[in-house]
Image (cartoon, rainbow, N blue to C red):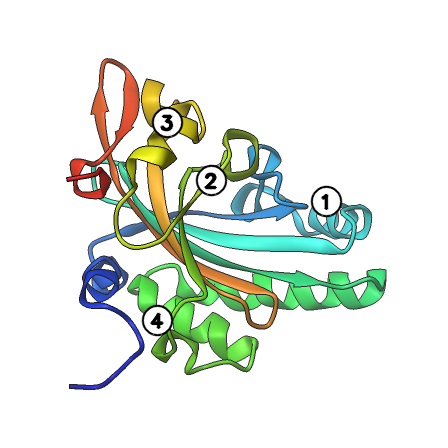
Amino acid sequence: MLDDGLTSSQRQHMKWLDHENLVRSSVQLASDGRWEDAVPIESTDRHALHRWLAESGPNVAIESVYCDASGDLQGFFGFRRIFEDTEERTSFWEGVVQATEAYQSVAPRQQLVAWLGLLRVPSMLEASPSGTQLGVFNQWQSAGPVTLRGTRLNEADIASGPDWLRSGATAPICREHYWMTPQRVWVAETLTVLGGGRYWVDPSALPV
């Protein structure tokens, strides 16, 4: 078996990338990690996108978001690049957006591989992730993530971590594996159950 650097649990939870029946529901851009204010490229014309990139500041990230046929979030992946120069930043991201339009109807992994090619790190997924976090979709910064030391939370995480661990979240909870090259690349899958109108951590990530 190929030693791809992933544990069996990590490999299992990245299988969603190969599901061809998933729908790419959006591709979104954010500045400084503010996913609450993400810009969906499908509904933003090229002139507006150019203005946004010029005014966004150096730290820009992009995500592709995938849902099942019922519209339920299944996972997302993305990457961050930092360009201090405005022209370099707008040129790079407009190129990424244009290239991404061609991958609307393919399995998620094919688009991710194409993005890794653009970043010149095509074999990145063969390396062990730099870390794993739990967070709330499109609220990663404001809700606060939790860094996992393995595949599960521990009692201390739940006692001292963000409120959504104990009271539920207003959006799906996801587990994100990330790599720190060229700045940061991530792949996340949902790890949540819905109950009482809120999202809760899936029991598979809770302490035994």
SS class, disc 4: helix
Frontmost of labels 1 and 3 is 3
The alpha-carbon separation of the residues under discs 4 and 3 comes to 39 Å
Residue 176 lies, with reference to residue 205, above or below; the image says: below
The alpha-carbon separation of the residues under discs 2 and 1 comes to 31 Å
Earlier sequence position, callout 3 versus callout 2: 2
Q: Please tell me how crowded label 2 is: few (under 14), some (14-19), or many (20+) other residues with Cα within 10 Å.
A: many
User: At 29% from the left edge and 80% from the top edge, which residue is drawn?
Assistant: 4
For the N terminus, the quadrant is bottom left
Give the image location of residue 70, x and y in percent.
Answer: 21, 36
User: At 56% from the left edge and 37% from the top edge, which residue is drawn?
Assistant: 141
Q: Please tell me how crowded label 1 is: few (under 14), some (14-19), or many (20+) other residues with Cα within 10 Å.
A: few
Frontmost of labels 1 and 4 is 4
The alpha-carbon separation of the residues under discs 3 and 2 comes to 14 Å
- Report the amino acid beneath label 1: Ala
SS class, disc 1: helix
- Report the amino acid beneath label 3: Ala
- Report the amino acid beneath label 2: Pro
To which residue does mark 4 refer?
Answer: 110
Q: Please tell me how crowded label 3 is: few (under 14), some (14-19), or many (20+) other residues with Cα within 10 Å.
A: few
To which residue does mark 1 refer?
Answer: 48
Q: Nearer the viewer, residue 155 or 53?
A: 155
SS class, disc 2: loop
The alpha-carbon separation of the residues under discs 1 and 4 comes to 28 Å
- Splitting the image into 4 quarters, where does residue 128 fall? bottom left
To which residue does mark 3 refer?
Answer: 159
Residue 166 lies, with reference to residue 94, above or below; the image says: above
The alpha-carbon separation of the residues under discs 1 and 3 comes to 44 Å
Circle number at residue 145: 2
- Report the amino acid beneath label 4: Gln
